[in-house]
Image (cartoon, rainbow, N blue to C red):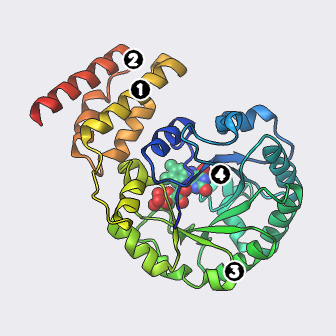
Amino acid sequence: MHIYLAPMEGVVNARMRALLTRIGGIDRCVTEFVRVTGQLLPRRVFFRLCPELSTEGLTPSGVPVYVQLLGSDPIAMADNAARAAELGAPGIDINFGCPAKCVNRHRGGSVLLDEPELLYDIVSEMRRAVPDTTPVTAKIRLGYRGSERLHDVARAIAGAGACELTVHARTRDHGYKPPAYWELIDDLHDITGIPVIANGEVWNYQDYLQCRAQSGSEHVMIGRGLLSTPDLARQIRDRNLQQPVNALSWQEVLVLLEEMLSDCITHCAPRHAGGPMKQWLGYLRRQYPQAQRLFEETKRLKAPAELVAQLELHRFEESKAA
Ligand SMILES: Cc1cc2nc3c(=O)[nH]c(=O)nc-3n(C[C@H](O)[C@H](O)[C@H](O)COP(=O)(O)O)c2cc1C
């Protein structure tokens, strides 16, 4: 049983991967997508999206990070996959699920799900370009408009040599609207012979159980659920082992938020330092009502010193109330 942290452009960067993998329970991460248009990208692009390449592709707690590529040109995708592998990526993932209009207009992401032959070409060129020891995996949705071609797509990807398939169990047209149709992927493992990872709408342990039962998949990938409940992967593991679960308290989450803010103050322009913390609060408020309050308290603050002071005050008041 594996639990993977989903790639999320603009949200799950190296900082977030370091925080979440330290809490535990996550077996692997995937970078935000690297957009491949025509040419071989400079090394710095890979290091920017995957700073972990300088530590053997591992987060500080030792969890591997696959580099995700998005594009439609088989040769350019292969060249860039080879470069990522050469730089030490532990694996290469391909994004065939992105729903963004601007990406789809340029023949990237989920629009390719209507072209299984092209998917086959992309995956097989990439597979050929990287060493046998470097896994090539793919992430898809059920389809673009509908899911009629799902089996063809899955067969093409597996037949071309991908060793794992992650499925966000919605079509592109479904966007992010619940539910996720986990039951529609339950025959993919039999059809492809490769591990299938179920993804979409796993917010808590009950969802996890339901997702596994309906998808027939042993493995799950979780994105927003791990941002709103940062110890969700650890909770799932603990419950599976029937050990007592100590859910992360709001005070413990505040320590993580402080750490994030301080890292942003060190590395970002002062007026942007509070952005990632506020963005995370937007996810955390689903699980922690206090996150909403902290968001209200900080939303108009920009100066780093004000943000730090407000966070301290909030923590003090919360500890008094506890
Ligand atoms: C803000 C945001 C950014 C995303 N960026 C990526 C990405 O770069 N690559 C990718 O394959 N999927 C991306 N996704 C999709 C997620 O990986 C995942 O499939 C989706 O959020 C459903 O899983 P969840 O319900 O566990 O969040 C993104 C999703 C969101 C909400």
Rounded to the nearest angstrom, the CA distance separating label 2 from label 1 is 8 Å
Q: Secondary structure at mark 1?
A: helix
Report if the CB atoms under discs 2 and 1 are less than 8 Å apart: yes
Q: Nearer the viewer, mark 4 or mark 2?
A: 2
- In the image, 159: left or right of 31? right
Residue drawn 57% across the image and 66% down it: 172
> Quadrant of the rendered structure where residue 73 is?
bottom right
Rounded to the nearest angstrom, the CA distance separating label 4 from label 3 is 34 Å
Percent coordinates x, y for residue 265 in the rendering: 46, 19
- In the image, 292: left or right of 173? left
Q: Secondary structure at mark 4?
A: helix
Q: Confirm if mark 2 falls within 8 A of ligand 1.
A: no
- Which residue bears the numbered disc 3? 193
Residue drawn 32% across the image and 30% down it: 299
Does 190 appear above or below 255? Answer: below
Q: Amino acid at mark 4?
A: Cys
- Which residue bears the numbered disc 2? 304
Q: Within 10 angstroms of label 2, few (less than 14), some, or many (20 or more) residues?
A: some
- Which residue bears the numbered disc 1? 261
Does 80 appear above or below 195? Answer: above
Q: Within 10 angstroms of label 4, few (less than 14), some, or many (20 or more) residues?
A: few
- Which residue bears the numbered disc 4? 102
> Quadrant of the rendered structure where residue 309 is?
top left
Does 216 appear above or below 313? Answer: below
Mark before the other along the chain sequence, 3 or 1: 3
Rounded to the nearest angstrom, the CA distance separating label 3 from label 1 is 44 Å
Mark before the other along the chain sequence, 2 or 3: 3
- In the image, 63: left or right of 86? left
Residue 192 in sight here: yes
Mark before the other along the chain sequence, 4 or 3: 4
Q: Within 10 angstroms of label 3, few (less than 14), some, or many (20 or more) residues?
A: few
